């Protein structure tokens, strides 16, 4: 009798919970979860924290036209460069018009606050992930006359050189900087960091023999490598990249194990944007990214198309924050 009563009580609780869950799915918890009527009611703005012609700007403009057609409203790309993209990211966070999103690089959405506690927004709390648009590994690059006929021999020379070698990056706290610090630990090498204003200056310094290695976007490095001015050591993806399939990965070469590092660009909204709007934009942008025309354009810009859901981007943010944040803390890296 007691067992039967317990079973009936458990069944009643289960049915009640199921009913509540179903109701929660049909009824918004609050007004912020409701889909605004007649949205979009005006042009959508995409804020970009870098100047026109930069990689994030090109990505934003590539998706803007098809997104405009899908929404039935103009989509305006608004460039607000500064602070490595954080000025635009902060403007996205503060937007309350339901018609403002951002196209950002991974630093803006992962380690901004870890690098500089004075950053006025918290990527995790203040941004709503929309979609991971494109990813790319970095290419470990050296001067054309660098020692060694393969990655193994190059790393042996790097270990022997110790801190007599130096590496370049486009600035303190960039993925090129943090990634190299991670690679130093994984491969037991110790080149000294030399920051530059940007990757073009890093490339010039390497060609001149002023630095011995750098992690560069493959699209920038491959041009100089094919011209015989630089040497490719390996890419930071788990296996060869479709962007530069002629170059092996560092893992494939046997100099690292499980070393995987990518740069990426993604779309995000203010955390205050109602979830139905975020979900709608996520569905549209991920679908647009995977269309043949847009995929081809993004590939030409140096991106492997991802086109994820908001959940997929959220997972990537969590993983990269842990990976890069660990390096920041262990190496004591602070933004300048």
Image: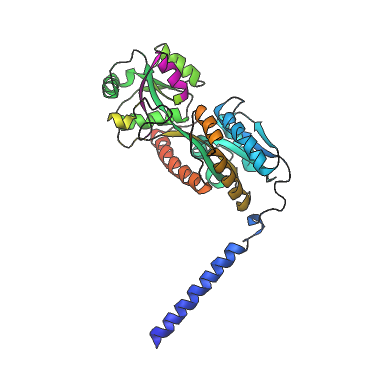
Which of these two is toward me, 12 or 201? 12
Name the image quarter holding residue 2: bottom left
The residue at the point 58 percent across, 34 percent down is 86
**Residue at the bottom extreme of this rendering:** 1
| Quarter that holds the N terminus | bottom left
Asked whether 149 falls inside the magenta stretch, the response is no
Residue 216 in the image: above or below residue 123: above
The residue at the point 30 percent across, 35 percent down is 257
Q: How many marks?
A: 0
Q: Is residue 319 left or right of residue 97?
A: left
**Residue at the front extreme of this rendering:** 292
Residue 207 in the image: above or below residue 86: above
Q: Is residue 328 left or right of residue 160?
A: right
Residue 122 appears in the picture as rendered? no
The coloring applied to the image is rainbow
Name the image quarter holding residue 50: top right
Asked whether 240 falls inside the magenta stretch, the response is yes
Image x and y of residue 38, in percent: 72, 51
Name the image quarter holding residue 210: top left
The residue segment tinted magenta is 219-246
Image x and y of residue 170, in percent: 48, 24
Which of these two is toward me, 104 or 234? 234
Residue 55 appears in the picture as rendered? yes
Which of these two is toward me, 18 or 114? 18
Image x and y of residue 213, in percent: 38, 20
Residue 120 in the image: above or below residue 211: below
């Amino acid at each position: 009798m007691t067992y039967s009563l317990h079973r009936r009580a458990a069944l009643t609780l289960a049915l009640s919970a199921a009913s509540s869950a179903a109701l929660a799915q049909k009824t918004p918890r609050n007004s912020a979860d409701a889909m605004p009527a007649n949205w979009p009611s005006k042009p959508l703005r995409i804020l970009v924290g870098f100047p026109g012609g930069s990689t994030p700007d090109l990505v934003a403009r590539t998706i803007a036209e098809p997104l405009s057609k899908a929404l039935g409203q103009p989509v305006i790309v608004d460039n607000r460069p500064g602070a490595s993209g954080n000025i635009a990211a902060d403007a996205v966070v503060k937007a309350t018009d339901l018609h403002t999103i951002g196209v950002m690089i991974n630093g803006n959405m992962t380690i901004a606050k870890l690098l500089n506690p004075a950053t006025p927004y918290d990527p995790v709390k203040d941004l709503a992930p929309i979609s991971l648009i494109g990813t790319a590994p970095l290419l470990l690059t050296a001067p054309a006359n660098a020692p060694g006929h393969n990655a193994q021999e190059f790393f042996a020379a790097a270990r022997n050189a110790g801190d007599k070698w130096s590496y370049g990056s486009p600035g303190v706290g960039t993925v090129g900087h943090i990634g190299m610090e991670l690679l130093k630990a994984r491969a037991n090498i110790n080149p000294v960091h030399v920051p530059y204003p940007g990757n073009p200056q890093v490339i010039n310094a390497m060609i001149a023999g002023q630095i011995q290695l750098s992690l560069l976007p493959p699209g920038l490095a491959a041009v100089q490598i094919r011209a015989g001015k630089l040497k490719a050591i390996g890419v930071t993806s788990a296996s060869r990249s479709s962007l530069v399939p002629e170059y092996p990965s560092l893992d494939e070469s046997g100099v690292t194990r499980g070393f995987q590092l990518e740069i990426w660009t993604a779309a995000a909204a203010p955390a205050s944007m109602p979830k139905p709007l975020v979900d709608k934009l996520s569905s549209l942008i991920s679908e647009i990214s995977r269309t043949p025309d847009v995929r081809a354009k993004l590939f030409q810009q140096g991106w492997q198309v991802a086109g994820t859901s908001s959940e997929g981007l959220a997972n990537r943010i969590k993983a990269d924050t842990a990976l890069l944040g660990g390096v920041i803390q262990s190496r004591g890296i602070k933004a300048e």
